[in-house]
Amino acid sequence: MKFPKSIILDSVAERKNDLNYGIEFVQELGNDDAGFSEMVVIIFKYKEKYYSVDIQHVNGENNYDHWDDEVDCPEVVKKQAIQYYWEEVKA
């Protein structure tokens, strides 16, 4: 789905919700080295579906400087991991 570049940069990239547009920040995955080398995937929610966008800042260049007025953000599926552990039970 395509989203306006301004909405993605002003809210999602800043890890903020945009209640007027209806975007909710969910999670950030990746590496942010204090702005020097940033490669993150940001997950956000829009109309009960989840989407992602890549934000990259490498060697002084931003990938979002080359975006069109609308950014294509793929839909993602929310998955939860179930963890098990073994514990010895003494009778």
Image (cartoon, rainbow, N blue to C red):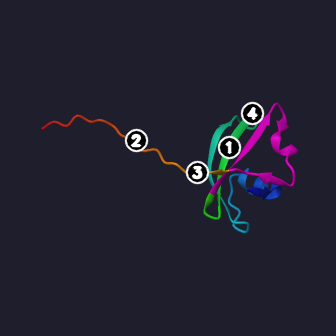
> Disc 3, disc 4: CB below 8 Å?
no
Q: Amino acid at mark 4?
A: Ser
Q: Residue at x 62, y 59 (%)?
A: 49
**In the rendered image, which quarter is residue 86 located in?**
top left
SS class, disc 4: loop
Asked if 86 appears above or below 54 in the picture, the reply is above
Q: Which mark is residue 77?
A: 3
Dot 3 or dot 4, earlier in sequence = 4
SS class, disc 3: loop
Q: Position of residue 87 (x, y in %)?
A: 26, 36
Query: In whole angstroms, how far apart are the C-alphas of marks 2 and 4?
Result: 32 Å
Q: Which mark is residue 83?
A: 2
Q: Position of residue 35 (x, y in %)?
A: 75, 38
SS class, disc 2: loop
SS class, disc 1: strand
Residue 6 is left or right of residue 76, and the answer is right
Query: In whole angstroms, how far apart are the C-alphas of marks 3 and 4?
Result: 27 Å
Q: Which residue is mark 1?
A: 41
Dot 2 or dot 1, earlier in sequence = 1
Q: Tell which residue pokes out farthest to the top in this image.
A: 59
Q: Which residue is mark 4?
A: 37
Q: Amino acid at mark 3?
A: Val
Residue 80 is left or right of residue 71, and the answer is left
Query: In whole angstroms, how far apart are the C-alphas of marks 3 and 1?
Result: 14 Å
Q: Which mark is residue 81?
A: none
Stretch in magenta: 50-74
